[in-house]
Amino acid sequence: MALAAFLFHDDSCTQFLLRFVAPMPYLPDPITLPRRRFLTLAGGSCLTVLLSNCASQTSQKPAATAFDPRQATWDEILAAAKGSTVNWAMWGGSDSTNKFADQWVGEQLKGYGVTLNRVPLGDTVEAVNKVVGEVQAGQTKGSIDLIWINGENFRTLKQGNLLYGPFTDKLPAMQHYDLSNPAVLTDFGLPIDGYEAPYTGSYYVMAADSAKVTQQPQNFTELLDWAKANPGRFAYVAPPEFDGNRFLLTVLYGVGGGYEQYAGAEFNEELWNQNAPKVTAYLKELEPFLWREGQTYPPTQARLQELFANGEIWMMPVFISKVAEGLAGDMFPKTTRAFTLPQLSLNDPSFTAIPINASNPAGGMILANILASPEGQLQKFQPAVWGDPPLLDVQKLSPEMQQKFAQVEASYGLPLKELISNTVPVVNAEYTARLRKLWADEVA
């Protein structure tokens, strides 16, 4: 059965998927879910059938060319990609990341004789659906060579046998990574197994204006008490927006017994049923004390940051790079401080992956290597460029490169090492999917 026919005409499967996949664009009623969003999450039994359908068609690897980079030396990979174009599908919602890609990354690729074609996405699931559709249609030369990806989108493609690889053992940049670091080896608890290359270190923390917030909360009980004492001065992004989802996960950790019990590759249904009501109760108690009394929520992280910048709110959950960028660009008050909720704030890295039907896997590997390289990690680390911290192990670099990273860290304006040490990983993507639905059904 063709994927489209199965997806849109098997009504029981459709209803199953609607229970677990967040509606987009950001509507509370799952019946309004656009069809292109159906493949957001791997984990349900119906989606497993869908992906196995794709997997059966990809059990014989696409033979786009007789040259297979997985079996080649790095020099042969470089030679094969020379003169080609590499199509990089990446979230396009940030001017700073787009500029980094178009200018610095594009220039690096030119040095290898490769041209960058950036494919902007509103959401990574668009690339996932593109790959699924192309493979189902038998296209062995697809339109995407590399995807900026993590979490449930990676799980969807990996479990569907829709990724090219393993390939990371070919990348020279991997010598600079700690291969015992879970942040490098797993993605939302799922082993990477060489199908993703490291890209960004990313940490979801808290930010406050220290001129107005004299006592930083250290847990969710203290956060609730602060919100009650300062009504309207705290807000978070409305799920299912990416940043809003992250806040929900920190709440699950905070009121549901801590991170450790949710760790591992498998979703724990019994644990979820036990702790989900605690999440609902907390969010409902917090809601009247949010910005605009919780009658409306900031729809994007950019809007949340505007509220913080103009003083409407005094505290917010935020990715650490946005704090560094806001300070470096004088968008945030100089009194802005980043802090963690210890062992609750998130270590949330992202990666790059090559689709199974990539037209130019050699070019994809070169691009992935540039992004993972010490030079690539250093460039995006600079607050004026992007501010995302490195994933690599700085101690594995030359003394000269170590000094350069130290100089950027000194200019970062935040106690980065201290903040990072208090974060914990993101767990199985099913928890996030359930949290999105819980928020839409019980809170929104």
Image (cartoon, rainbow, N blue to C red):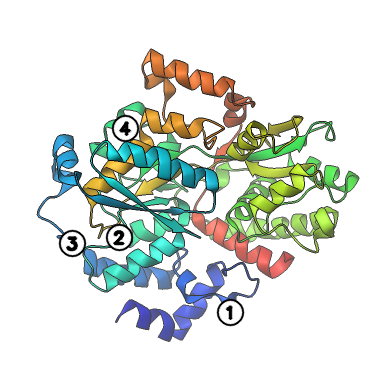
Which kind of residue does numbered mark 2 sit on?
Answer: Leu
Which kind of residue does numbered mark 4 sit on?
Answer: Met
Nearer to the camera, 365 or 88: 88
Nearer to the camera, 422 or 383: 383
- Of label 1 and label 3, which has the lower sequence position? 1
Which residue position holds label 2?
A: 162
Which residue position holds label 4?
A: 174
Question: Helix or strand or loop: what does disc 1 sit on?
Answer: helix
Cβ–Cβ under 8 Å for marks 1 and 2: no
Which residue position holds label 1?
A: 31
Instruction: Report how far apart the C-alphas of labels 2 and 3 lie in the structure.
Output: 11 Å
Q: How crowded is mark 2: few (under 14 residues within 10 Å), some or many (20 or more)?
A: many
Extreme residue in the top direction: 399
Question: Helix or strand or loop: what does disc 4 sit on?
Answer: helix
Q: Which residue is drawn at 56% across and 57% down?
A: 432
> Which image quarter is the N terminus in?
bottom left
Question: Helix or strand or loop: what does disc 2 sit on?
Answer: loop
Left or right for 25, reference 366: right
Q: How crowded is mark 4: few (under 14 residues within 10 Å), some or many (20 or more)?
A: some
- Of label 4 and label 1, which has the lower sequence position? 1
Whether residue 166 can be seen here:
no
What is the x, y in percent for residue 406?
51, 19
What is the x, y in percent for residue 242?
58, 55
Cβ–Cβ under 8 Å for marks 1 and 3: no
Which residue position holds label 3?
A: 62
- Of label 2 and label 3, which has the lower sequence position? 3
Cβ–Cβ under 8 Å for marks 4 and 1: no
Whether residue 160 can be seen here:
yes
Left or right for 281, reference 393: right
Q: What is the quadrant of residue 422 in the picture?
A: top right
